[in-house]
């Protein structure tokens, strides 16, 4: 992840901490939406979400991201049909995209066997009573799903603070966030680089830069570091087997109050 920005902000009291976690949850959910296969209402949700995100970034102290957010909003396609076409042109199913949205396509084989890596991602989801809906047609390591998981964990943290849950539950949410961020989102920097090279100036390329920079600030705030990947050591992304496109959502079971 490029750049390091000072985000130290004094937050006092559980109410302020809950508000911060809620804002982080909102941003993760919005970023996730940008990588979902576009449905009819996605464009409207993205437009509304980018407006809401301004206040969240300001509260978090992540104001250096505001110009990128503005650029992403300006780059949004004019219609849902154009957004879908852009998505398909970028990640079509007939050939390698060169900038796959699947984590395991970026790790050298000697670092992660794909099946083991997928099992590890799924293990995080299952630990919190989540599973990938059978309707998604996506692997659990799709970027939209990984960001959605971080949204859920941040929401759980905010909820735990509001409800006055014990420190053990709160610590579990926070530890899971930092661990998942460190172990499963460090590849986004290379993903954003490859996507920019392929479709520079597009909405998806700008959205990937926004995601990369947000994760960089999150890593700094949590005190974690990413394993650096580069073009020489990372595997060449390939498209997964042809699968039906659908929106990516979690089926949540056994959620605690």
Image (tube, rainbow, N blue to C red):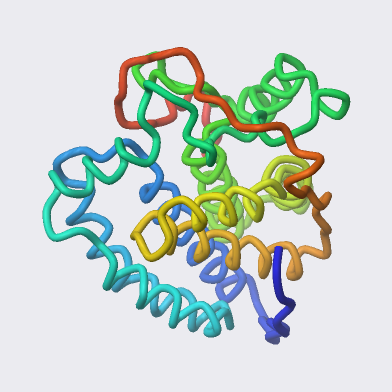
Using the rendered view, name the quadrant where residue 66 is placed.
Answer: bottom left
Looking at the image, which is closer to me, 86 or 175? 86
Residue 130 appears in which quarter of the rendering?
Answer: top right
Q: Give whichever of 213, 197 is nearer the camera.
A: 197
Residue 105 position within the rendered picture, expressed as x and y whole percent measured from the top left: 64, 30
Q: Using the image as rendered, state which of residue 73 and residue 155 is in the foreground.
A: 73
Residue at left 35%, top 77%?
A: 70
Q: At 44% from the left edge and 82% from the top edge, which residue is drawn?
A: 67
2 horizontally vs 49: left or right = right
Residue 27: percent from left, percent from top: 46, 61
Instruction: Name the residue located 22 percent from the left edge and 48 percent from the top edge.
Output: 83
* Residue 38 versus residue 27 in the image, above or below: above
Whole-percent x and y of residue 94? 37, 21
Quadrant including the N terminus = bottom right
Number of labels in the image equals 0
- Residue at point 52%, 31% (across, down): 255
In the rendering, at what x and y percent does residue 20 appear?
Answer: 56, 70
124 displayed left or right of 239: right
């Amino acid at each position: 992840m490029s750049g390091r920005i000072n985000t130290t902000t004094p937050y006092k009291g559980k109410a302020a901490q809950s508000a911060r976690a809620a804002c982080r949850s909102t941003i993760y959910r919005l970023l996730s939406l940008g990588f979902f296969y576009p449905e009819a209402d996605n464009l409207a949700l993205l437009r509304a979400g980018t407006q809401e995100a301004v206040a969240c970034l300001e509260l978090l102290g992540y104001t250096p991201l505001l110009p990128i957010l503005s650029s992403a909003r300006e780059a949004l396609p004019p219609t849902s049909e154009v957004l879908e076409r852009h998505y398909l042109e970028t990640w079509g199913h007939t050939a390698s995209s060169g900038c796959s949205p699947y984590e395991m396509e970026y790790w050298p084989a000697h670092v992660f066997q794909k099946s083991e890596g997928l099992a590890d991602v799924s293990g995080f989801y299952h630990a919190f009573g989540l599973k990938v809906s059978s309707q998604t047609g996506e692997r659990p390591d799709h970027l939209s799903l990984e960001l959605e998981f971080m949204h859920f964990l941040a929401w759980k943290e905010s909820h735990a603070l509001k409800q006055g849950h014990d420190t053990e539950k709160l610590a579990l949410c926070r530890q899971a966030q930092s661990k998942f961020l460190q172990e499963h989102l460090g590849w986004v920097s290379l993903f954003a680089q490859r996507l920019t090279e392929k479709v520079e100036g597009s909405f998806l390329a700008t959205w990937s830069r926004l995601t990369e920079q947000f994760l960089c600030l999150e890593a700094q705030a949590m005190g974690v570091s990413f394993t650096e990947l580069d073009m020489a050591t990372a595997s060449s992304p390939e498209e997964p087997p042809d699968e039906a496109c659908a929106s990516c959502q979690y089926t949540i079971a056994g959620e605690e109050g």
